[in-house]
């Protein structure tokens, strides 16, 4: 792909002195980027303190990202902080091809639906025990985070998180914030982060040591890693090994809990949809032991889960380093340039999704299947770099919400309650989001 001899100047989105577009991005990043797309086109520039960011947005931008070769867009030059903080040159999110595909294939079997499938009875028991200890109201995000991380850790690594939860959350949020979301680097030098990092690494090392000492391997992710080789045939060891052991915890903090919160909110504010989903959930649990096949019978819950992924994209803009100059939408993107591909913008385009601001699970049912247009649905990234644990994450979200709907009555604080989204460091429901909890009466 070559660049033309002439190129339009990339438009700069209007902002305010000093802060530029910071307030708009932090309040509603995808909403702001979608409005900018309609006003300025498929390529535009944003300003935040100390940085100017070029954004590619729209359906064609998503298709470009799917089809553009790895020689054009790379990650390693962007994610140097992640390499430094994990002390690993092999940390999966930072790798380009061909190393990325090699390590992705290596660990994917232990971060799939099948991994969760083998733990479903224990997961249901854990959810029930957690709910039994709840008071008359709960902070949703705190409880969803604990459940998600515990289930992921126990199913993927046969390890209980327990008192380590706070360290995992602080480490992960700070790592994502300064390593991916361009929050100030000095946050990684603060004592609270350094303590959390040290304790989390010690926790990861204990997991490895316990697996090495066991008489009979259980075939989980850590056992797989202990038997795996690097691309040059060496055993995974040291911080390279720990970087892969910690991957499930990062996903457990960043994605599933936020999506559980959004899904719960949408169901509680829509009584008709809630009733449909509760009825199908009750029917499935009445059949006996839950299986992945049982979860697949929850058609309305699946549609609602997918609609949450569409309307609340957690990773709605993906950074890339331009390694080779190319043209897009009348503009030249030059080698050495940092760009963001705002993949989540497509989720709100009426030419792709009918009534895009309406919560409509049926858009994922046949014959509509609006999400199956190439590049239309991008909650986990696009192309070969979609989240490798996406299937496990979707099943986990459905499991937790299904069990809650089956066992307790939940309610929003008021009939007109409006959930607020905060960027901390990626978009998610407010940590103050509460629901009331009562024993189920019907």
Image (spheres, grey):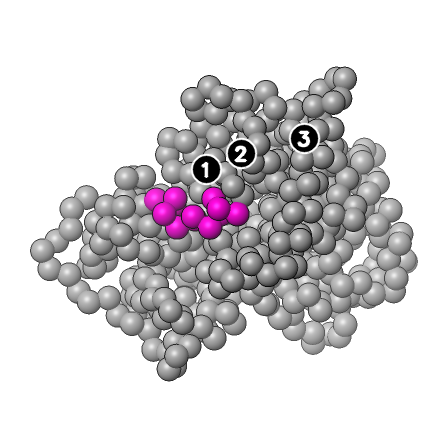
Task: Name the N-terminal-most of marks 3 and 1.
Answer: 1
Density class for disc 2 (Cα within 10 Å; few <14, some 14-19, many ≥20) is some
Density class for disc 3 (Cα within 10 Å; few <14, some 14-19, many ≥20) is many
212 relative to 330 in the view: left or right: right
Question: Residue 164: percent from the left, percent from the top?
Answer: 74, 47
- Spatial CA distance of label 2 from label 3 is 12 Å
Disc 2: which residue? 240
Rendered image: mark on residue 89: 1
Q: Which residues are magenta?
A: 74-85
Task: Name the N-terminal-most of marks 2 and 3.
Answer: 3
Which residue is at 84% across, 62% downward? 437
Q: Is residue 77 magenta?
A: yes
Q: Secondary structure at mark 1?
A: loop
Which residue is at 51% across, 41% downward? 87
Viewer-side residue, 437 vs 295 = 437
Rendered image: mark on residue 208: 3
């Amino acid at each position: 792909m070559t660049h033309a001899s002439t190129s339009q100047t990339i438009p700069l989105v209007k902002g305010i002195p000093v802060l530029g577009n910071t307030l708009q991005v932090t309040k509603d990043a995808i909403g702001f980027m979608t409005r900018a797309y309609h006003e300025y086109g498929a390529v535009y520039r944003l300003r935040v303190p100390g940085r100017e960011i070029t954004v590619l947005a729209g359906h064609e931008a998503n298709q470009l990202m799917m089809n553009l070769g790895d020689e054009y867009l790379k990650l390693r030059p962007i994610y140097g902080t992640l390499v430094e903080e994990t002390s690993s040159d092999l940390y999966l999110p930072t790798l380009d091809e061909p190393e990325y595909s090699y390590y992705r294939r290596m660990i994917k079997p232990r971060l799939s639906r099948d991994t969760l499938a083998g733990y479903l009875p224990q997961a249901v028991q854990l959810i029930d025990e957690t709910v039994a200890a709840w008071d008359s109201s709960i902070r949703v995000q705190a409880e969803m985070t604990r459940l998600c991380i515990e289930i992921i850790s126990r199913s993927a690594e046969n390890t209980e998180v327990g008192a380590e939860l706070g360290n995992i959350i602080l480490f992960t949020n700070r790592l994502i914030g300064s390593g991916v979301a361009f929050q100030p680097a000095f946050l990684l030098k603060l004592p609270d982060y350094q303590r959390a990092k040290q304790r989390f690494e010690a926790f990861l090392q204990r997991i490895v040591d316990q697996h090495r000492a066991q008489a009979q391997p259980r075939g989980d992710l850590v056992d797989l890693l202990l038997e795996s080789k690097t691309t040059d045939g060496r055993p995974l060891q040291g911080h390279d090994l720990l970087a892969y052991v910690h991957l499930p915890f990062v996903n457990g903090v960043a994605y599933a809990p936020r999506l559980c919160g959004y899904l719960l909110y949408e169901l509680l504010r829509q009584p008709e949809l809630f009733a449909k989903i509760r009825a199908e959930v009750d029917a499935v649990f009445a059949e006996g032991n839950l299986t992945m096949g049982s979860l697949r019978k929850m058609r309305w819950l699946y549609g609602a889960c997918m609609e949450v992924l569409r309307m609340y994209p957690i990773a709605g803009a993906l950074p890339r380093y331009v390694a080779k100059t190319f043209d897009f939408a009348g503009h030249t993107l030059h080698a050495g340039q940092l760009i963001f591909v705002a993949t989540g913008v497509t989720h709100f385009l009426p030419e792709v999704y009918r009534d895009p601001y309406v919560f409509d699970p049926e858009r994922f049912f046949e014959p509509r299947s609006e999400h199956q247009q190439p590049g239309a649905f991008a909650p986990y990234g696009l192309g070969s770099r979609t989240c490798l644990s996406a299937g496990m994450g979707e099943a986990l979200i459905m499991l937790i919400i299904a069990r809650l709907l089956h066992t307790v009555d939940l309610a929003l604080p008021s009939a007109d309650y409006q959930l607020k989204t905060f960027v901390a460091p990626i978009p998610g429901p407010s940590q103050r989001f509460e629901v009331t909890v009562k024993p189920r009466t019907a």
